Amino acid sequence: MTTASTATRQAVKPPTARRSFVERWLAMIFLAPTLVGMALFTFLPIVGSLILAFFRWDIISAPQFVGFANFASLAQDPTVRVSFLNTIVFVVVAVILELGIALSLASMLQARMPSWLRVFLRSTFFFPLVLSAASVSIFMRYMFNEQFGVVNWLLSLAGIPAVPWLTSPTASAAVVILVYVWQNFGFSFLLFLGALTNIPKELHEAANLDGATGWKQFSNVTLPLISPTVLVASVMAIISALQVFDQPYVLTNGGPGDSTRTAVMVIFESAFQQLEFGEASAIGLVLTVLILAVTALQFRLSRRFVFYQ
Amino acid sequence: MSSQTLHTGTGENPGSTTGTPTTHKPYRSRRLPAAGAVGRYAALAVAAALTLGPVLWTLSTSLRTPSESFNLPPSFLPINPDFTAYQEVFRQINIGLLVLNSALVTGLIALGQMASATLAGYAFARLDFRGKKAIFSLVLATMMVPVQVTIVPVFMLIRGMDLSDTLLALILPAIPTAFGTFLMRQYFLGLPNDFAEAAALDGAGPWRIFRSVYAPLAVPGMAIVGILAFNFHWNEFFRPLILTISEQNFTLPLGLVTLQGNLGTGSISVVLAGVILSMLPALVVFIFGQRTLREGLTAGASK
């Protein structure tokens, strides 16, 4: 689509020099709000972060150059280290769950069923995406309450003793993952649904004729055909999971201990609670590098494993 | 670009992955895997119940009296609704002000994004100027920078601009949008070129071509940008938490989290009433703009 339009666009090059002069000015005026805004609120802050990361600054006294000390604290400060480990565990588990649930549900929706049911299910799985993560965490925190929560009440019906969801380190990490996945699997689900619906019917019919059905057809026909979407969905899921903040902040505030503290929570706390703006910038830069690495890996993997039609 | 690219199919009958034939010939239906179908429906029913359950619980608990709200067994269906909690939430916090703040912030960000992204997207799609490719890549690159990395310098910049603890502190930095610009560029590239040629033959200059030909056609694309902005910023928590200080500048999510902190587990139906109220605009968008929102959300993955 893009290439075709680019080709036609070339055809309408302005006929006169005056025209192209006007067009250049118009382009500058049109771009000004976006570019000035980005210069001020994105590029300048990136440069600011890069500089700040080498200083100790509490906003009150004069900034003090400390070299790589802020980065060293990443390796030495146990809270920071644990938070990064937590974040990585969170990303791995949440993304696997998110993609697994999304892909299973999207495949199940491909079967023949009344169209009102398909529309209803699609809307249902999509719905949590329009809610605010803070609100979701508010009601989930009540639902996972140890004494009065509905989750433990349901478990008690099955004879399972009350789980200290928000006060045990393991269980609270599980709650943060569950709440996050509950709200976000709908996004990958939409991507998979689009990709699966776009597979030509003939390919499945041909596979049926060749006797490839069920799991065999899924792994040999369907999966290769949607592999570009699987890759894009994984990368988008990883990048957004790396930035998780709202859920652990509202559900557990990082606790008990540091068991649910994430990288972004540490950025928030060192900057706006401990007034360590330099350290916060350094942690932020490390997180950015992680995100860039994931994106770079995407391009690598897409050349090796992804099947493009 | 919109309708052709993303078939999230409503009426279509997509190819089956389980070997169910797509034609209606009766002799083929012997291959219908009955056990598989039952399992599939069971799994879908469980998934739907787990997705809707928490929302239904929130709604029906908000409709219990504050003193009963934590009683077991829990309620999942709003039978005998009681609206005390809704009256309480108006008494306990200035929820009208929270709604107003959220609406102002979200509305102005959405309008600002729609305007700036339309102009920039048009420039990238249909105007010629030097360095276009490089500038466009630079704009796209900003999508990779997480907000948490720029927040400390942005916070200081806002202080320097004397805007700390104002709604403008939330609005201004959110207006330039790389994704919106990308969407509008794609949108304008998808519009036919003939209009521009015809208008140019009639002697229309670049501004007239934009103003009278392409701008009126841009509305569906702008709707996607606007709805995405609404969905993101209405629900936003991280930036308001940092950039606003006094309660009179709080937005809804921040105000509700504060309310939960103040009330603890005392009267949860009051907090949940606030949560339900804050969901209403999102629900309206979900009902009337779901298709647009779906297209917008998935557009980034299909570039």
Image (cartoon, coloured by chain):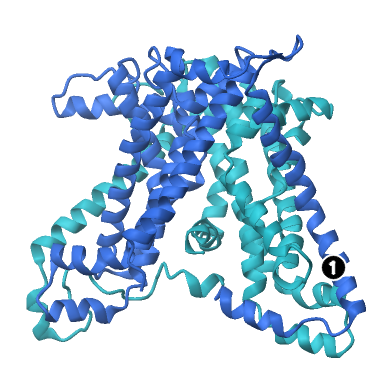
Q: Chain of mark 1?
A: A
Q: Quadrant of the C terminus of chain A?
A: bottom left
Q: Residue at x 61, y 60 (%)?
A: B224
Q: Residue furthest right?
A: A18
Q: Secondary structure at mark 1?
A: helix
User: Residue A228, percent across and down?
Assistant: 37, 62
- Give residue A238's position: percent from left, percent from top: 41, 43
Q: Is A120 situated left or right of B207 in this image?
A: left
Identified at 27% across, 74% down, the residue is B15
- Left or right: A9 in relation to A265: right
Q: Name the residue furthest top.
A: A61
Q: Residue at x 65, y 34 (%)?
A: B150
User: Residue B210: x percent and y percent?
Assistant: 80, 73
Whether residue B258 is visible, yes or no, is no
Q: Nearer the viewer, residue A177 or B41?
A: A177
Quadrant housing residue A192: bottom left
- Indicate the colour of chain B: cyan
Mark 1: few/some/many CA within 10 Å (<14, 14-19, 20+) = some
Q: Is residue B73 left or right of residue A287?
A: left
Between A207 and B73, the one nearer to me in the picture: A207
Residue at 37% x, 72% y is A198
Q: Position of residue B154 (x, y in %)?
A: 71, 31
Q: Which residue is mark 1?
A: A24
- Which chain is displayed in blue in the rendered image? A
Q: Quadrant of residue B75?
A: top left
Amino acid at circle 1 = Arg
Q: As displayed, is residue B42 above or below residue B157?
A: below
